[in-house]
Image (spheres, helix red, strand yellow):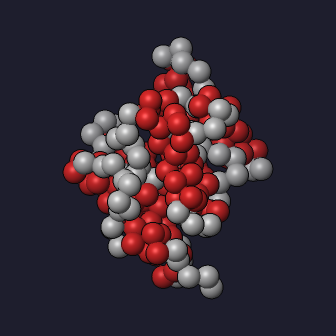
Amino acid sequence: MPSLHPLVAAAARGQLPDWAVAGRGRRSHMARVASLLEQWGREIGLGKHQIARWRAAGYLHDALREVPPAELADLLSGRLRGLPAKAWHGPAAADVLRSEGVRDRGILHAIRWHTVGSRKFGRLGRALYAADALEPGRTRRVRWRERLRARMPVEMDAVLGEILSHRIGYLIGARQPVHPRTLGFWNSLVDGS
């Protein structure tokens, strides 16, 4: 079993890298996401190494969330600048982690696409997407989130379908575009690909 990169191992313990930009509220959110991921990892029987990876992803996914998009633009390739600006922090964090020597593709992919989703998500990416949406600090639709959390991780794909259905419905209702990766993630859940 490969050892965890020191940056990932530190994040699993709740220590963010020096380049992270996250105030107290954001750090609390990240800790709640990491806690959910750890809980779900234990429930599905993951070993300590995998649980540490999941916890690290929970802490690292929003490491650059509070950086203004104009500052993140320089970190992104032109293709990634096509994402909504609010989603730039995921790809930027994944790119910085990679530049720091992190080679764990599962963690990098989960962090890169945690805001829009990905049809190529493994279990970690799917769990991170759900935990980010369902963490108990979110103040809207509290009971809905509680009900969905109670079904995790056993009904992960069904829960993800409900989260995505809500998000896509919101975007359509607000007459906003739905990113192709989000649609691809939705399609992968409903057609089993």
Please state, as top left, top right, bottom left or bottom right, where the N terminus lies in the image.
bottom right
**Residue drawn at (52%, 45%) of the image:** 92
On screen, 73 above or below 103? Answer: above
Relative placement, left or right, of 51 versus 109 is left
Relative placement, left or right, of 61 versus 191 is left
The image quadrant of residue 12 is bottom left
On screen, 173 above or below 1? Answer: above
Number of numbered discs overlaid on the protein picture: 0
Q: Position of residue 122 (x, y in %)?
A: 65, 59
On screen, 56 above or below 118? Answer: below
Relative placement, left or right, of 134 versus 189 is left
**Residue drawn at (59%, 31%) of the image:** 81
**Residue drawn at (56%, 51%) of the image:** 95
Q: Residue furthest top?
A: 175
Relative placement, left or right, of 107 versus 26 is right
Q: Quick one: 127 or 7, which is closer to the camera?
A: 7
Q: Quick one: 41 or 152, which is closer to the camera?
A: 41
Q: Position of residue 108 (x, y in %)?
A: 58, 58
Q: Position of residue 176 (x, y in %)?
A: 54, 18
Q: Quick one: 32 or 87, which is closer to the camera?
A: 87
Residue 13 in sight here: yes
